[in-house]
Image: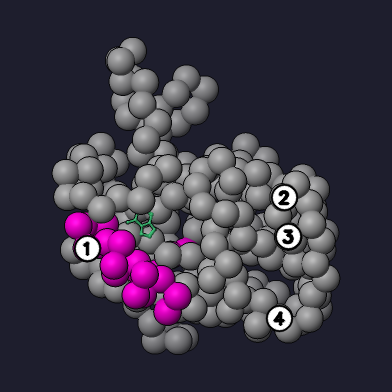
């Protein structure tokens, strides 16, 4: 079967570099977002940004799969670093993701768990292996780690520490965990890549404003190298 690749971000800045690389595309409005369809090097791709957060990213991921018939999903964007080894602009690929704000601990469940779900969702090992090949070809460092997702821009050490305590997360953001739920449920191989824009501390909003765009470019360019490798 011919594959159709979804490439998504949360914010316009996260997909702008991708649209620039693909050059020509058809824009379709659907359910309050714009989907950019293109044939890139002979492969069908669909690009979109969802808007920030778990609900909007759920809608976009589900739309790309169910409405636009995408068979693989790559997410590109920025994240707050938790692991001290992660510096601004560094790339991290999620091995697994969780929802750090999903809390029914009142009933004795662990953070991030609801009945019928799981605390973590694994990403595609094949796509991570492609990413590692791309990283070594580009001589770039690519960290693998746990990403925690929640509907909150984290700018506080205590919240960060709690996320580490419950999930041992290396980075945090606001969409990966929900995209993971959708792709896992619909059996679509998926990949979540993030470049660090801040370290989720008290200065996070300033760091984010300064580095979000440049980090978004780093992530987007890497994801497009992965697309090249996937369709090679
Ligand atoms: N994305 C980038 N930085 C973030 C932060 N500090 N919190 C949540 N999402 C982010």
Residue 149 image offset from top left, x and y in percent: 41, 46
Q: Which residue is under mark 1?
A: 203
Name above or below for residue 28 compared with residue 160: below
Q: Which residues are magenta?
A: 193-214
Secondary structure of the residue carrying tag 1 is loop
Secondary structure of the residue carrying tag 4 is helix
Q: State the CA–CA distance, disc 2 to disc 3.
A: 7 Å
Q: Quadrant of the N terminus?
A: bottom right
Residue 37 image offset from top left, x and y in percent: 79, 67
Left or right: where 227 falls relative to 160: right
Quadrant for ligand 1? bottom left
Name above or below for residue 127 compared with residue 113: below
Q: Which residue is under mark 3?
A: 34
Q: Which residue is under mark 4?
A: 22
Mark 4: give few (<14), some (14-19) or many (20+) Cα within 10 Å.
some
Which residue is painted at 52% across and 22% down in the image?
116
Q: State the CA–CA distance, disc 2 to disc 1.
A: 33 Å
Which residue is painted at 65% across and 82% down in the image?
20
Which residue is painted at 82% across and 61% down in the image?
28
Q: Give the mark nearest the N terminus, 3 or 4.
A: 4
């Amino acid at each position: 079967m011919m594959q159709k690749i979804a490439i998504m971000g949360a914010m316009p800045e996260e997909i702008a570099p991708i649209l620039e690389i693909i050059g020509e595309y058809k824009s379709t409005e659907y359910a309050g977002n714009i989907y950019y369809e293109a044939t890139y090097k002979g492969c069908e791709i669909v690009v979109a940004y969802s808007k920030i957060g778990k609900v909007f990213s759920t809608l976009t991921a589900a739309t790309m799969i169910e409405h636009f018939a995408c068979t693989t999903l790559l997410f590109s964007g920025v994240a707050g670093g938790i692991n001290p080894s992660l510096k601004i602009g560094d790339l991290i690929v999620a091995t697994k993701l969780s929802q750090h704000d999903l809390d029914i601990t009142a009933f004795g469940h662990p953070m991030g768990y609801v009945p019928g779900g799981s605390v973590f969702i694994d990403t595609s090992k094949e796509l991570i292996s492609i990413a590692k090949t791309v990283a070594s070809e580009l001589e770039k460092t690519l960290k693998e780690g746990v990403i925690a997702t929640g509907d909150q821009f984290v700018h506080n050490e205590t919240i960060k520490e709690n996320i580490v305590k419950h999930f041992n997360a290396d980075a945090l953001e606001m969409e990966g965990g929900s995209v993971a739920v959708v792709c896992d449920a619909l059996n679509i191989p998926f990949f979540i890549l993030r470049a660090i824009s801040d370290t989720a501390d008290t200065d996070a909003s300033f760091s984010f404003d300064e580095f979000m765009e440049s980090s978004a470019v780093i992530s987007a360019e890497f994801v497009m190298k992965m697309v090249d490798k996937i369709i090679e």
